[in-house]
Image (tube, rainbow, N blue to C red):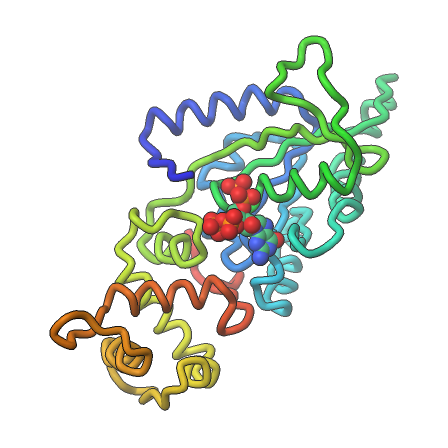
Amino acid sequence: MVIQWFPGHMAKARREVSEQLKKVDVVFEIVDARIPESSRNPMMEDIIKHKPKVLILNKSDLAERDKTKQWIRHYESQGIIAIEIDSIHSQITSAIEQAAKRATTNIFERNEKKGIHKETIRALILGIPNVGKSTVINTLAKKGAAKTGNKPGVTKAQQWINVGKSLQLLDTPGILWPKFEREDIGLKLSLTGAIKDDIIHLDEVAIFALNYLIEHKYETLCEHYKIDFDRDGEVIDYFDQIGIKRGMKMKGNEINYELVIETIIRDVRNKKFGPITLELPNDELS
Ligand code: G4P
């Protein structure tokens, strides 16, 4: 779904999320493990306030393992509970249930002292579009248990899904807007498919991708396209070489750059150069 975020949409999203937040004990903030900071909503902390949170680095199958571990250590060192998951190919129920317990222990203990006893933790999934919110919900709904069904006062559109023994998840995720303020963040969001292809100029995304691949995955890049690229050459020449090698031509024998650009971006997204992490905790990020 393509969402163009205008201020009115942001205000509405924020209002809706605030309503959802009232019903839950903990928030699962979903991000893309390839760009954990760039794929966060810029106002997340402000929106969820002091609600306990678990940061979920999803799509871990597409990210570099050791770098994902670095991110987890980084967040945990800041007191943020963080886990990595691959919501398509692996079991995620118990990791998510455990993390929710960790995040809510203090609150539940405090409540117990006040005589308030609760058996289940209620959770909401939050994040920007395309980070995998629905996939996580669907995977948990299938693997966990059936939905609890309609309950008085709960509209049909929002139901609770049982996850393991102690967790209930709202089946409608909260959708928030992505960061727009920096060009490199936009390029990362576009390259990973978090923002749609008509928002950012794809030629810039492909140049960004090639520069990244030359710096970090040069051998794999040459191998994949079967071209001995000049490492110190102009990036623009890479487009010509790929176009010629792949026979991507238009009438008059001109190189079809649009096709070359699409191919490079698709190949990155489809893991043709292996798992990719586009940022590290020490990179400067606002
Ligand atoms: P959203 O609700 O946050 O908007 O995201 P959604 O679940 O729709 O997932 C967006 C895309 O990401 C989907 O691909 C989905 O299959 C993929 N995805 C989600 N979780 C994972 C994961 O852990 N690993 C991998 N490899 N992919 C994941 P799609 O339907 O092909 O959409 P698109 O890529 O064409 O946007």
Q: Quadrant of the N terminus?
A: top left
Task: Count the numbered circles shown.
Answer: 0
Q: Who is closer to the viewer here, 129 or 252? A: 252
Q: Which residue, as the protein is rendered here, is positioned at the far front?
A: 251
142 on left or right of 197: right
- Indicate whether 13 appears above or below 191: above
Q: Which residue, as the protein is rendered here, is positioned at the far left?
A: 252
Which residue is pictured at 63% across the width and 17% down the height?
156
Q: Which residue, as the protein is rendered here, is positioned at the far top?
A: 152
- Indicate whether 276 appears above or below 28: below
Q: Is residue 131 in view?
A: no
Q: Residue 146's spot in the image, x, y percent?
A: 77, 31
Which residue is pictured at 23% across the width and 76% down the height?
236
273 on left or right of 261: right
Q: Residue 158's spot in the image, x, y percent?
A: 62, 22
Which residue is pictured at 77% across the width and 36% down the height?
163
Q: Is residue 263 in view?
A: yes
Q: Who is closer to the viewer here, 143 or 231? A: 143
- Indicate whether 70 appears above or below 151: below
223 on left or right of 152: left
165 on left or right of 276: right
Q: Residue 93's spot in the image, x, y percent?
A: 77, 45
Q: Who is closer to the viewer here, 202 or 47? A: 202
Q: Residue 81's spot in the image, x, y percent?
A: 68, 47
Which residue is pictured at 58% across the width and 68% down the height?
64
- Indicate whether 187 appears above or below 93: below
Q: Who is closer to the viewer here, 233 or 220? A: 220
